[in-house]
Amino acid sequence: MPRSLVGGDLAVPEMAQPYMKKDDDDEEVEYSPFFGIEKGAVLQEARAFHDPQLDVRRCSQVITKLLYLLNQGETFTKVEATEVFFAVTKLFQSSDAGLRRLVYLMIKELSPSSDEVIIVTSSLMKDMNSKTDMYRANAIRVLCRIIDGTLLTQIERYLKQAIVDKNPVVASAALVSGIHLAQANPEIVKRWSNEVQEAVQSRAPLVQFHGLALLHQIRQNDRLAISKLVSSLTRGSVRSPLAQCLLIRYTSQVMRESSMNTQNGDRPFFDFLESSLRQKPEMVELEAARKITEMDVTSRELAPAITLLQSFLTSHKPVLRFAAVRTLNKVAMTRPLAVTNCNVDLESLMLDTNRSIATLAITTLLKTGNESSVDRLMKQITSFMSDIADEFKIVVVEAIRSLCLKFPLKYRSMLNFLSNSLREEGGFEYKKAIVDSIITLISEIPDAKEIGLLHLCEFIEDCEFTYLSSQILHFLGNEGPRTSDPSRYIRYIYNRVILENATVRASAVSTLAKFGALVDTLKPRIFVLLRRCLFDTEDEVRDRATLYLQTLGGEVSIGNNEKDANDFLFGSFDVPLANLEASLRTYEPSEKPFDISSVSREVRSLPLQEKKAPGKKAPAAAAPAPVSAVDAYPKMLSSIPEFSGFGKLFKSSEPVELTEAETEYAVNVVKHIYDSYVVLQYNCTNTIEEQLLEDVTVCVDASDAEEFSEICSKPLASLPYNSAGQIFVAFEKPERVPAIGKFLNLLKFTVKEECMGKYGPGERACG
C-alpha cells in the first residue's frame, strides 16, 4: 500500500481513498480509511497525547493509526518508539474504557525496554487489581508480555489468584499469559500446577481449553505425567469442544509413543478416539477422524473414520466439506483403496462453488481412480482448470503426474492434457510444474519419450521464461539423440539460436553440439549451423560455437565413445575457475599451448588485501583467511556459544571491503549463511600507531532489510595498533526462503591515546 500521501482523519469519510477495484467496470470499489497515511504525520498527531484536556476520540484515532503502521511492518527508531511510549503512558489518566484498551495494545506492540517498563508497571498493577474485569484481564496480558523474570516473582501471587478467578475472561487471560511465560520462565510457571489443574475442571469452555494447554506445556517433558493426565481426562471430565480437540491430539501423541515403546502393538486409549467420532460437536468428530487416519490402523479400525468423513462430503457447510475432503486427500496418498467408496461423493464436489474443495476432490479422485476412469476425469478437469488459481493448478498437475506413473498406458491422454495446459495463461511456477511433470514422464515411461519431446519443442516456440527454455534444451540434448528420428528436433533447436535471448541461444548451441557429437549422420548439418553462430552478437554464443566446432572437427581429442563426449562437452568443470583465471593471467603465449592439466584442482580462499595508510608501516592483514575457509569458518563459529545452535553452516562469502584503503581503521565483512540465520563477521584492523581502541562495536542499521531481525552481537573489547580483531552480529531470517536487504554499518569505539592516556568516543561509517 503506498505511503507517499498524507492521510486525513479516520472519522472523515471524504478523506478515505479507493485502494482496490474488484471489477473493471467500476461497479464496486473498496475504501480504506488508512490509505496513504504517513509515519511522520501520525507521529506529529501523537502530540495530542500531551494535551491537558484529552480528546478521547482523537487519541483513539491516533493510536489506531499507529497500530496500523506497526502491523503493516513500519519500523520506528529507538527515539521514536520511546517518545510514543512515554506519550501513551499519559493516557492512563483517562477513564474511558475504549481508549484504555487501545493503550494496552499500544504498549504490547511497542515492547518497551527494561528501563522503560518500570514507568507503566505501577499503572498496570493497579489495573490488575481493579474492580473492572476488562481492566484486570488486559493488564495481566500486557504486564506478562513486557516484564522479565525478576519482576514476575513479585506478581506471581496475583497471577495464581487470577487463574482461579470466577470471571472466565480474567482466568483465560492469566492462563494464556502463563503459556507465553512458560517459554522464558518455565520454573516459575511450574509452581502454578495446582491452580492450573483447578482451571481444567472449570465449566467455562475457554478456561478449560487454555488450562489444558498450559498444563500439558508444564508437563511436556515428563512422558509418564502426560500419560496420567490423558488417562484421567479421557474418562469424560472435559466438556469444552476446544479442550476435547486438544485432548484428542494429546491422546494420539501418547498412543504413538506407547506403540514405539511396546512390542505387542497395544494401543491404549483407542476406544476414546473411536467414541469421539460420535461426539456431537463437529470439530471434535473431525479431529478424532483426522487423528485415526494418521495412525497405523487396520482397515476395520479405519472404516468408521472414513464413513464419518464421507458423510461430511455432502454437508451444507463449506468448512465441513473442505475439512473432510482434505483429510481424505491425505489418506489417498497412502491408502487409496480405503477412499474408493467415497468416489461418487467426490465427483459431485468437482463442481463445488468453492474452488479449494473442487481442487482437493479432483486430486483425490486422481489418486483413487482406476485405469478405466482416467479419460473421463481428464475431460472433466479440462473444463475446470481455467477457473482456478495457479497454486491449485499445480496441485492438479502433480496429481496427474502421479496417476500417469500409476497407469503408464494412459500416458498419451495425460501428455496431451499437460501440453494443452502449457498453452494456457499461467505464471512461472505453474509452467515449471508442467515441464517438470512432462520430463518425469518421459524419463519413467519409455513409450512417452518421442511424443513428450515434441510437446516440449512446441512449447519453447512461445515460451516466455528463459529458465524453462534452457531447461528444456538441456533435457532435449540428453534425450533427443537417442530417439528414432533425432533430425526432427534440429529445426526447433536452431530456431532458438535465431529468435531467443543470449542465454537461450547459448543453451541451444550446446544442444546442437550434443546432437552432432552423438549422431554421426547429423554432424555435417550441425557443422553448418554452428558456423552461422560464429557471427552472433554475444560473446558466449560465439565462444561456445568455436569450441564445439573445433571439438567436433577433431582438433580437440575427446575420446572414443559417447561417455567421453558427454563428459567433455557437458560434464562438470573440475577446475576451480579462480585457479584457471590465475593460470591464464600468468600464461605467456608461446609455441607450447596452454595445458589445463597444469592448473591446480585445490580450492583455496584468496587472502585479504593488506591496507596501508600513506606514509605508514603496513599493518598486519585484517583477519587473514585460512588456506581452506570451508573447514575453518564452521569450526570457528561453532566454538562461539551464541552461534553454536544455528545448525550447519551453508556458505561463507569472500571478504567484502567496507572502508577505503587510506582510512585509519580497516574493516571488511564476511557473510556466513545458515538456514535461518545470517552472521556478519567484521574483520577490523587499527592502523594508528599511537591509539588503542576499546569497546569496539558495529551498529547495523537493518531498516532496509525488513525480513531480518538482529538477535545478538559479539563486540571487541580492545583493538591495539597493528592487530586484527573480529566483531560478530547475527540476524534471524525466514528459513529456506530467499530474503534480501541492505545493511548500513557504523563502527563505534572508545579511543585511548597511549602517549597521553586520554579517552574519547569515536565512530566511523564503514559501508
Image (spheres, rainbow, N blue to C red):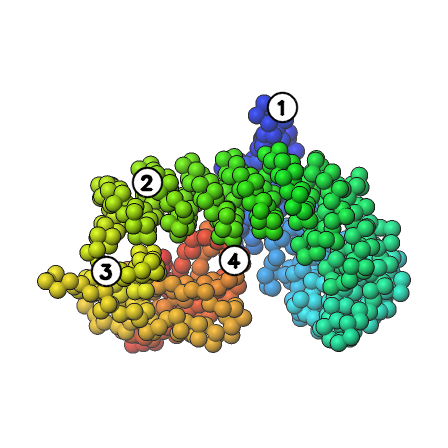
For the residues marked 4 and 2, what is the alpha-carbon distance in whole angstroms? 38 Å
Query: Which quarter of the image is occupied by the C terminus?
Result: bottom left
For the residues marked 4 and 3, what is the alpha-carbon distance in whole angstroms? 43 Å
Q: N-terminal of the two: label 3 or label 2?
A: 2
Q: Nearer the viewer, mark 3 or mark 2?
A: 3
Mark 3 nearby-residue class (10 Å; few <14, some 14–19, many ≥20): few
**Dots 3, 1 in contact, CB < 8 A:** no
Q: Nearer the viewer, residue 377 or 169?
A: 377
Horizontal side of 742 relative to 400 (left or right) equals left
Q: Is residue 471 visible?
A: yes
Image point 77% across, 72% down: which residue?
265
For the residues marked 1 and 2, what is the alpha-carbon distance in whole angstroms? 50 Å
Q: What residue is shown with label 2?
A: 494
Q: What residue is shown with label 3?
A: 557
What is the number of callouts on the image? 4
Residue 9 at x, y percent in the picture? 61, 34
Q: What residue is shown with label 1?
A: 27
